Image (cartoon, rainbow, N blue to C red):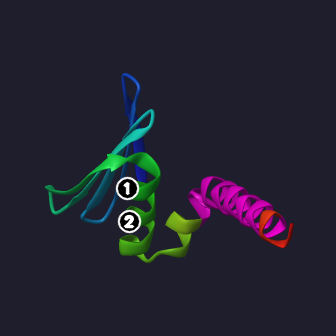
Amino acid sequence: MDACTKRSTMIYVHKNYRLEVNKARGKFYVNDRLIFQGFAFKALIMFVNKCDDDNVSWQFQPQLSMRERCQFKREEKNDKEKTL
């Protein structure tokens, strides 16, 4: 997988998939066709799922695990509010 920077935009390429991330905005391309444009984390999830490669998953593991930790904390907080 190749990564390059163009100003503040990060571009990740794996086979015929491309992910462009600019701050909180992301674009996901398949065969140079725009499939998704919007929230960067959603584009990242689509990129990792479509690539279906352990090397790609490993490269983005910190972002994915951080996001999961945040969701679990939010769910625990909601569970505590329900019991009160």
81 or 58, which is in the foreground?
Answer: 81
Magenta includes 63?
Answer: yes
Q: Name the element at disc 1.
A: helix
Instruction: Give the dominant element type of the magenta stretch: helix, strand or loop.
Output: helix
Q: Which mark is residue 9?
A: none
| Alpha carbons under labels 2 and 1: distance apart | 5 Å
Q: Which mark is residue 46?
A: 2
Answer whether labels 2 and 1 touch (C-beta < 8 Å): yes
Q: Is residue 45 above or below residue 6?
A: below
Residue 3 location, x and y as percent? 42, 44
Indicate the quadrant where residue 42 lies. bottom left
Disc 1 residue type? Ala
Give me the residue at 30% from left, 65% from top: 15
Q: Which mark is residue 43?
A: 1
Residue 63 location, x and y as percent? 61, 53
Q: Is residue 34 left or right of residue 5?
A: left
Q: Is residue 38 above or below residue 49?
A: above
Residue 41 location, x and y as percent? 47, 52
Which span of residues is magenta-colored? 58-80
Badge 2 crowding class, 10 Å Cα cut-off, few under 14, some 14 to 19, many 20 or more, is some
Q: Is residue 56 left or right of residue 5?
A: right
Give me the residue at 38% from left, 63% from top: 47
Badge 1 crowding class, 10 Å Cα cut-off, few under 14, some 14 to 19, many 20 or more, is many
Give me the residue at 37% from left, 22% from top: 7
68 or 60, which is in the foreground?
Answer: 68
**Residue at the limit of the structure toward the top, as seen here:** 7
Give me the residue at 50% from left, 64% from top: 56
Disc 2 residue type? Met
Quadrant (top left/top right/bottom left/bottom right) for the C terminus: bottom right
Q: Name the element at disc 2.
A: helix
Magenta includes 68?
Answer: yes
